[in-house]
Amino acid sequence: MDDDPIIIRPYEGSAETTALSQIWLDASLIAHSFIGEQRLIEQRALIEDQYLPNSETWVAMVDGAPVGFISLLDTFVGGLFVAPDMQGRGIGRRLIDQAMALRGDLELDVYVHNAAALRFYRRLGFQEQSRRAMDDEGLPFENIRLRLTRSPT
């Protein structure tokens, strides 16, 4: 990987939806295991039919293959997912850098139980803004709203 450049490019639409939703599922089965495998498998259709087509998505490529993506709804990060076997190689950081270059300030929600993601975002300088006891589906999975603000130059 050290010699393999990470290329960040715009999402190319339906031609790569399946590949990105597989990255989402593989990463979610690890990071969001508390939600349950069946529910995550059911949510995959939402990722393909609503989430990816309705957000501004940027794809991280290594050796011509997608290895991660970030989806933006204005300054809100709807999701950041990196293939499990590619995590820890700077891909997530590069995707956040891309979003910051485009938007400046960013906000996102992260599950409290997703400890690895919470550590990752805090290392990048995201600060807690608020908490809520339920997720977007009304399930009892606590979320934290985080914000990263561009430092003044």
Image (tube, helix red, strand yellow):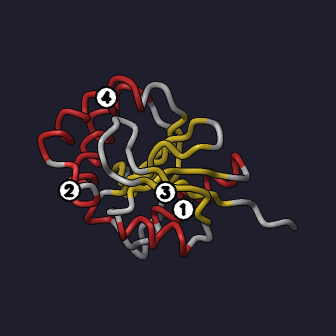
Mark closer to the chain start, 1 or 2: 2
Disc 4 versus disc 1: nearer the observer: 4
- The residue identified by callout 3 is 144
Q: Are marks 1 and 2 in contact (CB under 8 Å)?
A: no
| Residue located at (24% from left, 43% from top) | 22
Secondary element at image label 2: helix
- The residue identified by callout 1 is 94
Q: Are marks 3 and 1 in contact (CB under 8 Å)?
A: no
Q: Give amino acid for label 3.
A: Ile
Q: Position of residue 36 (x, y in %)?
A: 16, 48
How many neighbours does mark 2 have within 10 angstroms: few (below 14), some (14-19), or many (20 or more)?
some
Q: Give amino acid for label 4.
A: Leu
The image quarter containing residue 100 is bottom right
Quarter of the image that includes the C terminus: bottom right
- The residue identified by callout 4 is 46
Q: Position of residue 17 (x, y in %)?
A: 33, 32
Residue situated in front as seen by the camera: 132 or 136: 132
Mark 2 and mark 3: Cα distance apart in space: 17 Å
Q: Give amino acid for label 2.
A: Ser
The image quarter containing residue 38 is top left
| Residue located at (27% from left, 52% from top) | 28
Mark 4 and mark 3: Cα distance apart in space: 22 Å
| Residue located at (29% from left, 48% from top) | 23
- The residue identified by callout 2 is 33
Secondary element at image label 1: helix
Q: Give amino acid for label 1.
A: Arg
Mark 3 and mark 1: Cα distance apart in space: 22 Å
Query: Would residue 27 appear left or right of 145 to someone viewing this image?
Result: left
Q: Residue furthest left?
A: 38
